[in-house]
Image: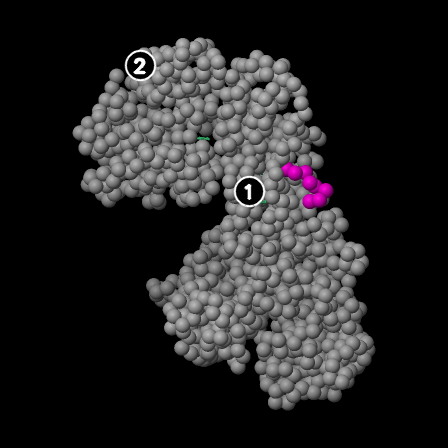
Amino acid sequence: MTHIILRHHDVENIHELSVYQANGGYEGLKKAFSLGPKAVIDEVKKAVVRGRGGAGFPAGLKWGFIPGGDMQKYIVINTDESETGTFKDREILEKNPHQVIEGALIAAYAVGATKIYNYWRGEYMDAAYACEKAIKDCYASGLLGENILGSGFSCDFYNHFGAGAYICGEETALLNSLMGDLGQPWSKPPFPAQEGLYGKPTVVNNVETLANIAPILVNGADWYVGLGTDQSNGIKVVCLSGHVNRPGNYEIEMGKVTYHQLIYGEEYGQGMRDDKGFKALLPSGGSGPVVTADALDADVSFEGLNPFGSMMGSASIIVMDEDTDMVWATEKMTHFFKHESCGKCTPCREGTFWLEKLLIKINKGRGTQEDIQKLERVATQIQGKCLCALGEFATSPVLSTIKHFMDEYKAKVNTAVPVPAD
Amino acid sequence: MSDLVTIFVDGIELQVEQGATVVDASKRVDVDIPVFCHHPKLEPVGMCRMCLVEIGMPMRDRATGEPVLEEDGSPQINWGRGLQTGCTVRVADGMRVRTTTDVVDEARENVIEFLLTSHPLDCPICDKGGECPLQNLTMAHGLGESAFDFDSKMQNEKHVPLGELIFLDRERCIQCARCTRFQDEIADDPVIGFHNRGRALEIVTLSDPGFDSYWSGNTTDICPVGALTTADFRFGARPWELIPVASISPHGPEGANITMSTRQEAKSGGRVVIKRIMPRQNELVNEIWISDHTRFVHHFADAADRLTKPLIRKGGVLVETDWDTALTTVAEKLQAAGSSAAGLSGDRPSNEDLFAFQKLFRQGLKSHHIDLAASRIAGGDVTAQVGIASGSNLLDLGRGDVIVVVASDLHEEAPIWWLRVKQAAERGAQLVVLNVRPTRLDKFATHLVHYPVGEAVATVRQLLGAAQISDGASDQIGKIAEAIVGATNVVAFYGYEGLTYAETDVLAKSLANLLQVKNSDGHSHVGRVNNGLIAVWPHNNTQGAWDMGIHPALAPGYQSVDQPGRSAAEIYSGVQDGTVQTLFVMAADPVGDGLMNGRGLLDFLVVQELFLTETAKVADVVLPAQSWAERDGTFTNGERRVQRYYPAIQPVGESRPDWQIIEQIGHKMGLDKPHFAASLVFKKGIAAGVPQYSDMDYRSIAKVEKQYPDVGGEDLYYGGTSYENKHGLGQQWTSAAESGDVAMFTVPDVTPSAAGALPVIRTAALYTPGTLINRSDVLSPRMAQPTLHLHAADADRLSIATGDAVIVSVNGQSLQLSAHVNGAAPQGLALINGVSYAAGVLDAKIETA
Ligand SMILES: Cc1cc2nc3c(=O)[nH]c(=O)nc-3n(C[C@H](O)[C@H](O)[C@H](O)COP(=O)(O)O)c2cc1C
Ligand code: SF4
Ligand code: FES
């Protein structure tokens, strides 16, 4: 299969502007210029590109929310990529940066933005250097800056580094951080499309979402709609990791590949490490509910895991084998959320701390049956009460492992020697 | 007024303004949704999650847009997904709110339980205990017991001085961001902020010196826990031991309403003392905010060096004496001097004091030689005609309105007005700022003019000219004139920065005429609500001093006298040349302020004071007066609002109220018997003798009505611990323009003071050293140091560097100052700061010490 996003697998050195252009690069942008802004938005709406940052909100609709008028508008590329087990945006930007730049430029042209900010996860320095070079080349070739390709449209592009906070992937926290404020989300509304960066209308899109745009303009929305399922058009880059033989990023057509295929297929994971048995997987990093073997035949798409009470999210699939201690794994994930909680809202700030306390206690062999109930209660106490989704995410591993692996919890508390609380 | 929408809160139907939050709207029908982070004066953030409620909207048919009805004909309600924060959701027509359901109760329990997992529960030693929103809401909505059985609460620093005035207890903070938002949104001093994240999220100061803001104390009122405390109250008393006493700020012209929390305590020898000062809500004056000056200056009242007994000069030294001897001596000396006796007063005493003072001179001695000891700014006679109309509220100014501020640094001189003007500008009012140099207000100005040194008056005259011609001139002055004339409402403030008294007179009259220019609809900007002139008076009762006739040419109520007496300047020169022999100084220190050179050739000097000032030291008799905290009285603020204050503490020593002392002297001279109470001085004296006050008495001034936002009640969590106003919103007297047209003023000519090579002006600082503020130890680190601000280019020319000691000679006085380069001074103008008053543009000699 030829890749649509991970094109570096098919075309050597596609990160070079000349190579990218020789292989159809920036044709999408030219097409956009010939269509005009409104038609571009219509085309992207028609293609129904659901956001690849995890929430799955259609990009075309989002662009359509940007008000008309002469005010400053912004495009912000979300390259914070900090979800556990997610590493696709880095590869896309490092190996095929122009496709993202082109997508962002089309978005900017469509909504009338003249500044693009690319907000990077702080640790992604190397990839950002590659991107920085791509931007320089674009400026030199008239693809960025004043009057791009003689279209009369002008746009600038800036890379900006975060300081390594998961919460800064949440779009409003990202914008606060970008403005130099504390990386904490704000309560929506206002949505970024109304009042975003510096109070101005702003589109925040994930790297992968934007990488889909140029091919859609070149090949047409109908081509894109023909790929994938009813509810999940197009292709998806999945990040496969954990106890598999060949972890990595794989580009798949949505709805056409099952989780089982991903783990065992020759072109994907090539089976479980050391031929161990499969126990569970996290379909969307730490933030989505764990699923077990019965979900393996579900296909990878936005709706595939609905019957199993979980979701695809950003498709960061972490596979766990039969030896995995699920209570231990839950503690690790909970630690992550506690560590990353911004502290702005009460349930997330205090609740994640409490969850971790209980899990440590249980894992240390000091827990009681009551502590399991308490764990579940604290998780439900957080649910539905937080300012942003992070707190909600934190409850997923806890509640789903309690649901699927109660026996493991029980085993830990049954052997426990009760000691006073620490 | 904005559009009203109908909503239903727990079944109660109500109409509220569109845009109100669900929490604020519910409050209107007494449905209290508990909150921590929400504050009715701040933008919502939705972070504590305490206010979760169920919110529903009527469903509409997608195709037809018609409401979907239940079988009984009532609209079908979509209760949305889960709970929503009532503090961030804005009302919409038809909205339903449920605040008493099980899910809501449970959510409140949950949030409280979470908050308490990292709260120290040190209520028994916490200053907020007893008036703590967290404590109260835990009682109301918390579980009796927590399932959180770990001992590991946060172990954080407990006594963090954010600055000299405010201490932070990091364990108690519940991360509600009220303090930081207050500093960002209201005070425009973003000097504190959050640091770190998660449970480690903590408040830090971002400024050097720490928490560098004139407003810092307000954060302690709105902090919903005992995390923020003031340096002079912390660990000082328990809230339930405190008796609140209503009062008025003894400092600025804004007349901020305050409450003094008092306690009788053993450690103060059984005396009742002021433990703290807090704001008292008056949406017409200071809302629920006070400056740190107002909050911390009160320590002078309890100062150890207060005068406690009358003093009399014997054998060249002042010795203690009894009241009768002192009063008799003064009465005899004054009577002997008769109409040649002169009186100088400060502008801090009450209306009652001031009225009695002028009466003693005018009626008792037939002397009009009375004046303010330091007259800095003219125009009381002008504001009496065209001052801001009664019934006005700066809070109502916004889009379509214009505010003009001339020659005043409001942030330093009248911070409450600065706050309210800034807010009006944020609401969309056009702000016109005219000054000789940049000030904190510039940032909010729509039209900004920095006129050349000495051209304040010329600039305002130009503006007046442009407004009168209205030829649509497109230069800046033309545009400003057009904006002013065309505005719905106009309020103009004028001050005295860099101006002489005579110049301020011209300024007041020119602005008065400008406000009287009629627009195309025939409206002018005087005599109508939310229009008129405001003088930025230097003190809390300068307005009252004008009204009471502390003026050589104006008797009470601005009635002209046939034979004006000596002005202050003439009295000072008379003291030097012997033409003034007998002088009574009340609540002023002309010697200390450099206005009077010792006692000159005076035969007799009596000083009525709180402290042994430089003037008192050279007096023959010193009479100990009571401070405002020990008695009642009225002050009139710069908006001509007459406001009452009440006695909070017992008199210090044998001190007496000023009015009483004066009336006792008068009585000895054969005048009426002294009144029994200040209220009677008001009723029998002021209301009868000052026409503008004729419809007032202590009861009418003490009237209150319901104010919004509804703060200060039982539900402390809503607005903070600022006090509900139960003791009076005050009463504004009507300006002449409200009852008919007033004539245009004849504007005299004035020559600006001659400037030398490097003109110098004195600029105000809120914490300028002075008799009262010097007694407040907490403020001493913040006190403005005597400083000469120079622009780098001027400093170069004079070979002066930052930190150099310089001597600046002005008006025959030499000031020791420390030079500061690259600070606030524009090129070609030097600024003197942190010293008492000096008028006009000075031709000063600057030398390195
Ligand atoms: C805690 C949290 C972390 C997130 N992290 C990321 C991220 O790293 N990258 C990303 O693209 N979106 C992330 N999101 C989703 C963004 O808020 C936002 O929905 C997305 O960037 C929108 O782009 P899309 O519509 O193209 O997906 C995160 C959301 C939350 C609540
Ligand atoms: S110090 Fe007080 S006001 Fe400031 S965030 Fe903490 S609890 Fe809120
Ligand atoms: S979230 Fe509404 S009051 Fe705090």
Of B815 and B368, nearer the camera is B815
Q: x, y percentage for residue B336?
A: 74, 88
Looking at the image, residue A228 sits to the left or right of residue A412; the answer is left
B189 drawn magenta: no
Front residue of this view, candidates A118 and B507: A118
Identify the residue at image location x=34%, y=25%: A48
Indicate the position of residue B175 as horizontal and vertical percent values: 57, 40
Question: In what element is the residue under mark 2?
Answer: loop
Q: Residue at x 54, y 31 (%)?
A: A348
Which circle marks residue B202 in the picture?
1
Q: Residue at x 70, y 36 (%)?
A: B139
Disc 1 with disc 2 on a shared chain = no
- Which structural element holds mark 1? strand
Q: Which mark is residue A267?
A: 2
Residue B121 counted in the magenta span: yes
Query: Which quarter of the rendered image does ligand 2 occupy?
Result: top right
**In the drawing, does residue A268 fall left or right of residue B460?**
left
- Residue B347 visible somewhere in the drawing: yes
**Is residue B556 in sight in this rendering?**
no
Above or below, comparing residue A345 to residue A365 in the picture: below
In which image quadrant can residue B131 be found?
top right
Mark 2 crowdedness (10 Å alpha carbons): few <14, some 14-19, many ≥20: few
Residue B400 is marked as none
Q: Is mark 2 within 8 Å of ligand 1?
A: no
Give the amino acid at mark 1: Glu
* Residue drawn at x 67%, y 43% as measured from the top left: B132
Distance from disc 1 to disc 2, alpha carbons, whole Å, reads 50 Å
Q: Picture coordinates of residue B112 (x, y %)?
A: 63, 33
The residue segment tinted magenta is B119-126
Q: Is residue B218 left or right of residue B60?
A: right
Nearest the viewer among B106 and A156 is: A156
Tell me the chain of label 2: A
